Amino acid sequence: MDFEGVDFLNLDDAMTLEERMVRGEVRRWVDKEVLPIIAQHFEAGTFPMDLLPKMADINLLGANIDVFYGGAGLNSVAYGLINQEMERGDSGLRSFVSVQSALVMWPISEYGSDAQKAYWLPRMVSGETIGCFGLTEPDFGSNPKGMLSHAHWNGTDYILNGTKMWITNGTISDVALIWAKEDEGIISAFLVEQGNPGFMQNKIKDKFSLRASDTGELVLADVRVPVTHVLAKAKGLKAALHCLDQARYGIAWGAIGAAMACYDTALNYAKQRIQFDRPIAGYQLIQEKLVYMVTEISKMQLLALQMGRLKDQGKLTSVQISMGKQNNVYHALQIARLARDILGANGIMYEHQVARHLCNLESVYTYEGTHDIHTLIIGEKITGLSAFT
Amino acid sequence: MNIAVCIKQVPATESKIKPAEDGLDIDRTGLSYVVNPYDEFGVEEALKIKEQVGEGKVTVISIGSDKTVEALRTCLAVGADEAIHIKDDALAKGDTYITALVLSVALKKGDYDIIFFGRQAIDDDSGAVGIQVAELMGLPHVAGINKFDLNAEGRTAIANRQIEGASEIVETSLPAIFTCQKELNEPRYASLPGIMKARQKPMTVWSLSDLELTAEDCGAEAAKVAIEKITSPPVREAGKKIEGDVPQAVAELVRLLREEAKVF
């Protein structure tokens, strides 16, 4: 049966026809192309590379990028809905799209030169080039400002040294957007290509979570980067955080997708599972869980939709995005846990997808700014007092 | 090559349908709608022919309320070139004949070489409109096709249709009408830029007067079929389990088949 989605508050009425059509097409695409194969990839720990040309066919990559460079030029709500539907498939798949679109294509289109845009963006729209974003380091996660990666100017080129950790698309990417400190301490962005001497892309294995996503460690040992590969307008940590805002916005929507998949599975299961001669959906403790789920999903949708409208008006702030990411992922994780609970032993099976979402969401909860860090960002905003250190 | 595809907006396949209170329609509260899946085969085939021939125009046509615009725009997003939306309050109570009459008049205004329909709409499953339009327009038709080939000059077409235990291959002159069956093709996804561009494609709106038809021609009075009542199918009764040892159980089964089920 086709997935119907959750719309308890008639929020479809607050969306345009185009937004609903984008959602419908991606939903259909995920049903047909992703759901039949994703559990196998999760188990094998592989990213479904076969999907790449299919994603490019319907312009899923760089859907937020200007049509001039081959993007779909979608508004923020439609872009968010793509993330929602992709994450209903798998958080790993949404992560791939987020990184490609929000963390590599967006920075190039925002901070790159016309020549860089013309070179990279069409290649990334078509999936010919995969990108990754290297900010986090082994010892600098929540505190990226302390990064050790260094870019030394030798008079003709930059020489990069350092290690980047937990990098989505790390080993499958053709180009890495690496953040490193220049000699005078300014954090800048460099495009480092696969095969560049001294650049190593190592796979991080043995994960419980995001198993259908490629995660890597990037090592840079005297990697020479020409000036043509510097994003000249990206100066300072602020630029990197601005990129993360784009991705976190997408995550707030993505979490709704994972939550809807879990709720839908749990609701159908509870209506069919008979214990003590009647469906378990008829018992109060189960209903309480299902009601929590549908209520929180509805609130997550309201939050995401309002963020999208503000974003298109140019009014969305980083701290508002923190609230969206923090709240939506937190509740998606709770919903996944409750869904697993309702399904009993069946809840741990690949067949029922909730455990896969649950394991994935454990990562989503702490990546792109941990839940706690986003809490402190909001805390600082409302009290005027920083509690980071 | 000028191709028309007549489409219908229908409740989504996953909808739970129940009769409306007046028993003359279904309860449409909260239903979501899609393009009739059989019509999507027609749209896809039309786009493929246009691509194959290298020129031409694909026009999608539908009768319905304002909501029908969504179905038409979906087809435009997939790649159709323009849409015709026929809406008129007088059409609300029409049957397949009225639908066919209105469509035939609308189709005569265009110079179409090929006209596609779905073989049936998944809501009322009549499977009549395409064939009725062919009759009203005096055009040949091939119903329920699962393969379509245009000949080299584009003057005739060969279509396959599945019949009991065999495949029937029909050659027809053009213009002609074809109703589309599963297996004809695999409808494509709308590209995301395609969705954004759909709004800029032309959509013509016609009322009955634009077609020189009147409410009398097309209202409930003119319909050939009147719906008396729509009811849900009866709830299936629980089966009967015959217990006991085999010889006894068989005897009981035979008795029940004869006396209750009356099969012999």
Image (spheres, rainbow, N blue to C red):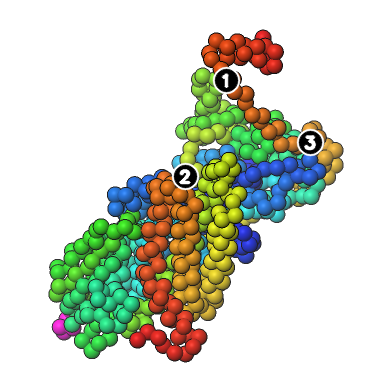
Chain of the residue that carries numbered disc 2 in the rendered image? B
Q: Earlier in the sequence, mark 3 or mark 2?
A: 2
Instruction: Let me know if marks 1 and 2 both belong to one chain.
Output: yes
Instruction: Note whether A55 is above or below A66 in the view shown.
Output: above
Please report the bounds of the magenta region as a residue range: A153-157
Q: Amino acid at mark 3?
A: Lys
Residue at the spot of label 3 = B229
Measure the alpha-carbon separation of dots 3 and 1. 41 Å
Residue type, mark 1 in image:
Glu
**Mark 1 vs mark 2, CA separation in Å:** 65 Å
- What residue sits 57% from the left and 67% below the top? A299
| Of A54 and A379, the residue lying toward us | A379
The answer to whether residue A131 is above or below residue B65 is below
Query: Where in the figure is residue B214, as x and y percent of width and height?
Result: 83, 44
User: Where in the figure is residue A62, as x and y percent of width and height?
Assistant: 41, 64
Label 1 SS: loop
Q: Which residue is mark 1?
A: B243
Q: Are marks 3 and 1 in contact (CB under 8 Å)?
A: no
Does dot 2 land on a helix, a strand or a loop? helix
SS at badge 3: loop
